[in-house]
Amino acid sequence: MASGNVAPPTDKDGIVALDKPTLCGTISEARFTARERREARARKPQPWVVRKLMVVVTLGIMGYTAYVYGGRFVLRLINSGRRREAVGLLVPWSFLYAWMVWAYAKVIITPPGNACDYTPKTPQPLFPRGQWEAETRQPQDPDTDSASASSDASLADIEAGRIGGPAYEELPATHIPGTSLPMPNGNGGPRPPPPRRKSSTRSRGDSESRPPPGRFPPTTAPLLPPHRWCSRCAIVKPYRAHHCRVCGTCILKFDHHCPWIGQCVGARNHKFFLNFALATAVFTLYTFGSLLAFSVMAGRGGGGNGDEDVDPQEVVVIALAALFALFTLSLGAAHTRLILRSQTTVESLGVQRMKERESAALAAAGMGCFDVGAKRRARIAYDKEWGVPEKEGNIWWAGSARAGWEDVMGRSVWGWIFPIGAPLGDGLHYRPNPRFDADGRWRRRSEWPEALR
Ligand SMILES: [Zn+2]
Ligand SMILES: [Zn+2]
């Protein structure tokens, strides 16, 4: 609870005794209550009105931009006798504005895909007795019921790495000793690497003598029904679906919850989300460029009658356009990269974490910041042994960048630009990468199907 403070006296249930209030006790109590409230709030989905608030704000910003550009800037040009310039600016601007509003309308009215509409409610699936119970128990929280701890596979849990199967080194023997052949019991996970314990007490001298420790892919077996169970919706989530706490439901191919569109980005509207990011980037760049150029000219007295003042409202729109141009350009680039890799935002976090573990392991093996060459060689060796994380190590890798792109954006090139058409993927059916075992764990190259090695 409140760390860094002297613990106030508590009764046997751990409740702060308040009959003799102390300053520390009062602070702790307040913190405890605030945290309880915060957590209760986090468990509840946001009210509909709150979720849609940013849509109203976004529409307001769009409306204001139209007023300043059309109602003030262009009108000022016409009034100062520069009709041809005004029309020349206004026509493409109107086209870009319509493109952006159209894409925005599509992304806010297209539901991302609610997993509960396609999946029947079921009782919670459990791991086979004895095999997983010990493994799914969270070591840092021994009182937590293992089943419920592993069941709540929400985004925060995934991000925090709190869900997952056993660590490799804790798995029962999965292979026939001395070979890479899986045990006949079918639990064909990868061979466990040499024992590795996270230890903050290990001395540097000890770690320096170790050889590079190897790659540690995520230990979660994401395809097992107990790991796909959502306790809030009481469903076994389809592949790639996740629960959104804000919306309070499971979303097909959940990417992230976007406050700007007032809903999640998922299987059905990811395409429109990217269409919208592209349209907004082009629109804001055009608005920024044209307004800035004419404001500079007006400021210098270069255009018209020379004594024009710079309109402060135009300056506001220039600033807004610059801000949103940067935002949507980086957002669009990030999502394009993810889609070409057949990954969602939430899935990319898993790869990112694995790379962080790898870096930490290399550092623990004595490779400092300046051992760039040695680290690179180690990573090349890992890729040789396991494959490239973004492709061979990506359970949903569609086989090529093009296939990943079409799964989200559809086949039509027009649909890549404008919010028309639909994604190829239905958000429900995905073929796991054959480089993974049946439970969804990444296997070494030597264990891949022959044709893929
Ligand atoms: Zn759910
Ligand atoms: Zn959501």
Image (spheres, grey):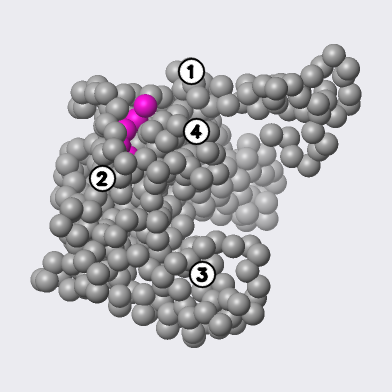
Q: Name the residue under label 2.
A: 223
Residue at the extreme bottom? 373
Q: Residue at 65% of width from left, 73% of height from top?
A: 203
Q: Any mark on residue 370, and which? A: none
Q: Earlier in the sequence, mark 1 or mark 3?
A: 1
- In x, y percent, where is residue 101? 37, 34
Q: Earlier in the sequence, mark 2 or mark 4?
A: 4
Question: Is mark 4 in CB contact (under 8 Å) with mark 1?
Answer: no
Q: Earlier in the sequence, mark 3 or mark 2?
A: 2
Q: Of circles 2 and 4, which is in front?
A: 4
Q: How many marks?
A: 4
Q: Of circles 4 and 3, which is in front?
A: 4
Q: Earlier in the sequence, mark 4 or mark 3?
A: 4
Q: Of circles 4 and 1, which is in front?
A: 4
Q: Mark 3 points at which residue?
A: 361
Q: Which amino acid does label 4 sit on?
A: Thr
Q: What residue type is labelled 2?
A: Leu
Seen from the viewer's position, the closer of residues 40 and 424 is 40
Q: Of circles 2 and 1, which is in front?
A: 2
Q: Name the residue under label 1.
A: 47
Q: Residues within 10 Å of mark 1 (few under 14, many from 20)?
A: few
Asked which secondary structure carries label 2, the reply is loop
Asked which secondary structure carries label 1, the reply is loop
Residue at the extreme left? 451
Asked which secondary structure carries label 4, the reply is loop
Image quarter hosting the N terminus:
top right
Q: Distance between the residues labelled 4 and 3?
A: 29 Å
Q: Residue at 89% of width from left, 24% of height from top?
A: 22
Q: What residue type is labelled 1?
A: Pro
Q: Which amino acid does label 3 sit on?
A: Ala
Badge 4 residue CB within 8 Å of ligand 1? no
